[in-house]
Amino acid sequence: MNSKAKGTTGLPLAGDLAPASLPVTLDEMHPHKISHLSRTFVLHARTLEQLDAHGLADELESHGWTLDRIRLFGRLSVAPDTLPSRFNHLLVIPQYEMEKALDRRAVRVRVQGRSDRTASERGRRHA
């Protein structure tokens, strides 16, 4: 598998493939940089359930803030507390915190082929 970036998609996939001894190469789009600009703002129940299956949800919850209700557009109130999940809330967490946890998991499951070269340095074009 070759992932363009070690982000929130490439890292979990690499962590799932590594224990099966499948070769993985992760090319970082911004090596040695942690962006404090976050594309992820809130995690929902299903995402937390998936992260929990990989042993990450409790760690992430310790770095974020839970919301039991959110108001949208001034009139709509969303309250996930009725969801049949232990994660019946929203988790506000910066993406860089999620990426750090995913990166630690990748190290823990021995992801091989981690690269600090960017995809463009490897001769690929970004779409």
Image: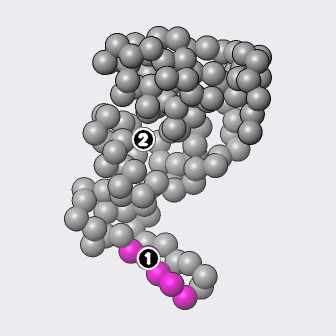
Label total for image: 2
The tag on residue 60 is 2
Q: Is residue 56 above or below residue 6?
A: below
**Mark 1 or 2, nearer chain start:** 2
Answer yes or no: is residue 108 visible.
Answer: no
Residue at 58%, 46% in the rendered image: 94
Please state the horizontal and vertical placement of residue 19, each as a whole percent of the image. 32, 18
Give the structural element (helix, strand or loop) at label 2.
helix
Query: Quick check: is 77 in the magenta stretch?
Result: yes
Q: Does the stretch in magenta take in 15?
A: no
The mark found on residue 89 in the picture is none
Instruction: Identify the residue position indicated by label 1 in the image.
Output: 78
Q: Amino acid at mark 2?
A: Leu
Tell me where the magenta segment starts and ends, as one range: 75-79
What residue lies at 36% left-to-right and 70% top-to-bottom?
Answer: 80
Q: Is residue 113 visible?
A: yes
Q: Dividing the picture into quarters, in which one does residue 110 lie? A: top left
SS for tag 1? strand
Left or right, 16 with respect to 114, comes to: left
Q: Report how far apart the C-alphas of labels 1 and 2 lie in the structure.
A: 22 Å
At x 42%, y 41%, the residue is 60
Query: Residue 98: x and y, percent?
Result: 50, 38
